[in-house]
């Protein structure tokens, strides 16, 4: 018989208990499956809610240019993974539950239910773990400043690449610390500096940081310090309020331990780097660098630059290539004559890149020789053809009247759309200094009559400029200067602009000898008196005294003596004189004497006027001529008047701006009208301002003004509502064209309008010191499709009441604090 092997297993109590525990644990995955699925669904919902709450905080932080923490990112990623997996289990749960039997204690497929139940239990534990780990006091931190901020720019301008490489080679290979780039306005200095800035991004260098600062003509060391302080992490409210010296020490302490590049764009005078706090770079290859742009080679010397580069105008070939690019081959080839005309325009631009680019873009849509020829003529005179100035230039004769004036506005519109002029605000345009330089070149026929046109606007002069032949000067602009003595003889002078001449307290007697003068601009000056001798200026066609706020004496019969006057601007004239005019001033009595003299001006076409009494206003309104040419009207210091005749003002067909100020007894703007709203009047009025009318209750007449673009209401203590609910308040087109609404210091104001308005054109809403105003006339459909700005105090904004949550959410990102 073979051997028999016997195996004996000892089965004690401990072994049996372990087997039983193992069996029960596994069985629990089946018996608890249904409860675990319910718990899984509940806990998953809690986890998703927690994730959503967290992501709202993260999104808010990221909108403030912060960066989410890595641990937050990892947690959210884990939650999203678990969310997908748990969702799949819940979706499969119904099928697995159907396999259960014996009241859920067993399964028809034990192995399948066991595995599924185990996975559900594990996922439930994962979710609870994530819930415990998902508590974050801080979700994001500030993004560290990059070493270099890339600046937007076009591809390198034709002809600039070689100079870019030359300057770059100097910065990285030569022993220099301070480098100057100089050249005339518009020649491409800023473009060159921008490409240098961006080149630090893609080139291997060992600089720790690159700082870009725009300096400009108005040098303020504090502004330069703030830009640098922001870049190196010093900037906060407390630091901004510190003294210049302390801020300089802080900047120096940080920069002295770094290898830096400071790029200063557009400096007009020496910038004392030590006062700013910038350590002075030495003439070494591995030194820090300061690179600046300026129009003046003298500034390069005062900055003690180690090397200077002159940024030149483009050569003829490069200028033509750049102009071709901007105009486009399609336009140049659409008629055989256009190519030659385009070359003429290119030559007139004198190789100036900004002029070539701006003019080229403007001409890209001109596809006939006639348009090109006409555009060249417009360019030849663009420096002077602003409608009011036309008169002083002799371009508007005494018979032309409104036809030529309308043509003038039409041409100004063309220049604005061609980017040769820039709109500043309603009815105001400005010319870029480069385009101005080009226009002056063209007007002077390239050096032929250079000293006939003298423009020194904003040059900061304290002495008269050095001019060889003053007697030949025809047009002179000294705006924004402080020359103390101007006694030169200029018998040929036709245009004199002394506006914003803040050093001008009285007119030099020599002005009365300018017998050829046709255009005199004294706006926004501090002069107090017009001399009697000015009666000699019998050829004057345009006189601008606008915002000469301290002017209190204009001699009697002076205004009426200017019999050829076409344009008279006196809006805001004598504003700070508070009605205290001497009896021998035409301003005495609130303007009645002035109105009488205006009636003698038979050629008057443009009038902007200030009146100081209801009697003067009534006298003014009786004249058809004055009503038909008034573009702006300031009603000020009406003493003893509780109301203003609004229908009379509504008939001023050219009125674009109306301001009512310092009428402390004015209670109402009387409206006596029963017709349709659209026929009331004020069709040209675009700007309405009210200030310091302490008894005025409301401004309901505003709903009758169809084309209003700007409303400003300040310092009216009794005003409780802007628009009162009444006969005219239901106008469905109210404020359809409004772009700006500003109200301030109305302590009792409770309502702007009684219901939400669409405001289809609104750009800005500014509210200050109106703490009783709890609700704005806005709903979720207001300003739809537009990004508007709402300015006010932060605590006022927090306490605002909204039409609904959708409205609040729609305007939440529009707020900017005034504090």
Image: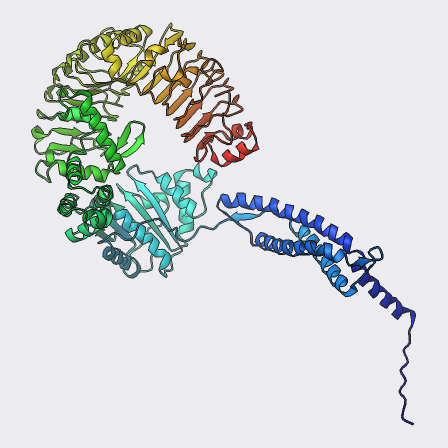
Q: Is residue 731 left or right of residue 87?
A: left
Outermost residue toward the bottom in this view: 1
Number of numbered callouts drawn: 0
Coordinates of residue 356 in the picture (x, y in percent):
21, 45
> Residue 637, can we see it?
no
Name the colouring of the figure. rainbow
Q: Is residue 37 left or right of residue 192?
A: right
> Residue 636, can we see it?
yes
Coordinates of residue 574 in the picture (x, y in percent):
29, 16
Coordinates of residue 363 in the picture (x, y in percent):
22, 42
Q: Quadrant of residue 684?
A: top left
Coordinates of residue 22 in the picture (x, y in percent):
82, 65
The N terminus, quarter of image: bottom right
Q: Is residue 425 above or below residue 138?
A: above
Comparing 227 with 112, the one in front is 112
Q: Quadrant of residue 654?
A: top left
Comparing 437 with 631, the one in front is 631
Q: Is residue 283 above or below residue 298?
A: below
Q: Is residue 658 left or right of residue 732?
A: left
Residue, x 26% and y 26% (percent of image)?
Answer: 502
Comparing 392 with 124, the one in front is 124
Residue, x 57% and y 44% (percent of image)?
Answer: 57
Q: Quadrant of residue 226?
A: top left
């Amino acid at each position: 018989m073979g051997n028999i092997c016997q195996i004996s297993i000892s089965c004690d109590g401990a072994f049996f208990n372990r087997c039983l525990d193992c069996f029960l644990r596994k069985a629990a995955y089946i018996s608890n499956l249904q409860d675990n699925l319910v718990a899984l669904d509940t806990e998953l919902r809690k986890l998703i809610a927690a994730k959503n709450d967290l992501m709202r905080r993260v999104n808010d932080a990221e909108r403030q240019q912060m960066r989410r923490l890595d641990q937050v990112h990892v947690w959210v990623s884990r939650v999203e993974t678990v969310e997908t997996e748990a969702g799949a289990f819940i979706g499969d749960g119904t099928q697995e539950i159907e396999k259960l039997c014996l009241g859920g204690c067993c399964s028809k497929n034990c192995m399948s239910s066991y595995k599924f139940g185990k996975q559900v239990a594990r996922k439930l534990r994962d979710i609870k773990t994530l819930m415990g780990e998902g508590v974050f006091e801080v979700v994001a931190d500030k993004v560290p400043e990059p070493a270099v901020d890339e600046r937007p720019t076009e591809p390198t301008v034709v002809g600039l690449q070689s100079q870019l490489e030359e300057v770059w080679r100097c910065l990285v290979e030569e022993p220099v610390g301070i480098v100057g780039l100089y050249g005339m306005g518009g020649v491409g200095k800023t473009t060159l500096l921008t490409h240098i800035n961006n080149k630090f991004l893609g080139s291997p260098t060992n600089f720790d940081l690159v700082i870009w600062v725009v300096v400009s003509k108005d040098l303020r060391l504090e502004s330069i310090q703030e830009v640098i302080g922001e870049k190196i992490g010093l900037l906060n409210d407390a630091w901004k309020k510190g003294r210049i010296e302390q801020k300089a020490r802080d900047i120096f302490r940080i920069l002295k331990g770094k290898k830096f590049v400071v790029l200063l764009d557009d400096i007009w005078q020496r910038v004392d780097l030590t006062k700013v706090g910038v350590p002075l770079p030495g003439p070494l290859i591995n030194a820090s660098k300061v690179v600046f742009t300026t129009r003046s080679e003298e500034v390069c010397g005062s900055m003690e630059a180690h090397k200077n580069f002159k940024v030149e105008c483009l050569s003829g070939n490069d200028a033509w290539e750049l102009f071709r690019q901007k105009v486009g081959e399609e336009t140049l080839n659409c008629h055989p004559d256009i190519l030659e005309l385009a070359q003429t325009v290119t030559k007139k631009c004198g190789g100036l890149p900004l002029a070539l680019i701006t003019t080229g873009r403007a001409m890209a849509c001109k596809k006939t020789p006639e348009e090109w020829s006409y555009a060249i003529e417009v360019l030849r005179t663009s420096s002077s053809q602003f409608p009011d100035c036309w008169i002083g230039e002799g371009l508007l004769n005494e018979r032309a009247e409104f036809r030529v004036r309308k043509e003038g506005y039409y041409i100004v519109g063309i220049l604005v759309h061609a980017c040769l002029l820039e709109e500043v605000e309603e009815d105001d345009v400005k010319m870029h200094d480069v385009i101005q330089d080009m226009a002056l070149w063209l007007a002077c026929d390239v050096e032929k009559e250079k000293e006939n046109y003298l423009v020194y606007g904003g040059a900061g002069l304290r002495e008269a400029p050095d001019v060889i032949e003053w007697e030949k000067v025809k047009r002179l602009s000294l705006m924004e200067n402080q020359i103390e003595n101007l006694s030169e003889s200029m018998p040929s002078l036709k245009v004199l602009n002394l506006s914003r001449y803040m050093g001008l307290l009285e007119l030099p007697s020599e002005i009365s000898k300018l017998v050829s003068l046709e255009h005199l601009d004294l706006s926004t000056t501090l002069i107090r008196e017009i001399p009697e001798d000015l009666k000699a200026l019998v050829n004057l066609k345009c006189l601008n005294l606008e915002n000469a706020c301290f002017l209190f004496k204009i001699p009697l019969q002076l205004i009426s003596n200017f019999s050829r006057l076409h344009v008279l601007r006196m809006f805001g004239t004598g504003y700070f004189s508070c009605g205290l005019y001497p009896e021998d001033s035409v301003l005495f009595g609130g303007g009645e004497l002035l109105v009488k003299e205006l009636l003698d001006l038979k050629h008057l076409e443009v009038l902007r006027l200030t009146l100081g009494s209801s009697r003067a206003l009534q006298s003014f309104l009786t004249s058809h001529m004055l009503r038909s040419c008034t573009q702006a009207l300031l009603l000020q210091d009406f003493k003893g008047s509780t109301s203003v005749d609004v229908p009379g003002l509504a008939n001023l067909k050219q009125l674009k701006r109306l301001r009512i100020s310092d009428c402390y007894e004015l209670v109402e703007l009387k409206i006596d009208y029963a017709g349709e709203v659209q026929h009331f009047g004020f069709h040209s009025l675009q700007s309405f301002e009210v200030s310091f009318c302490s008894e005025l209750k409301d401004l309901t007449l505003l709903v009758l003004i169809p084309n209003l673009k700007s409303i400003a209401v300040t310092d009216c203590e009794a005003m409780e509502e802007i628009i009162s609910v009444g006969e005219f308040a239901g106008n469905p087109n109210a404020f359809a064209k409004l772009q700006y609404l500003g109200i301030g210091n109305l302590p009792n104001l409770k309502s702007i309008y009684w219901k939400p308005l669409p405001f289809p054109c609104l750009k800005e809403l500014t509210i200050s010191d109106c703490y009783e105003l709890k609700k704005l006339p806005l709903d979720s459909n207001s300003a739809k499709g537009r990004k508007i700005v709402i300015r006010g105090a932060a605590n006022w904004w927090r306490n605002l009441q909204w039409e609904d949550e959708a409205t609040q959410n729609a305007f939440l990102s529009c707020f900017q604090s005034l504090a």
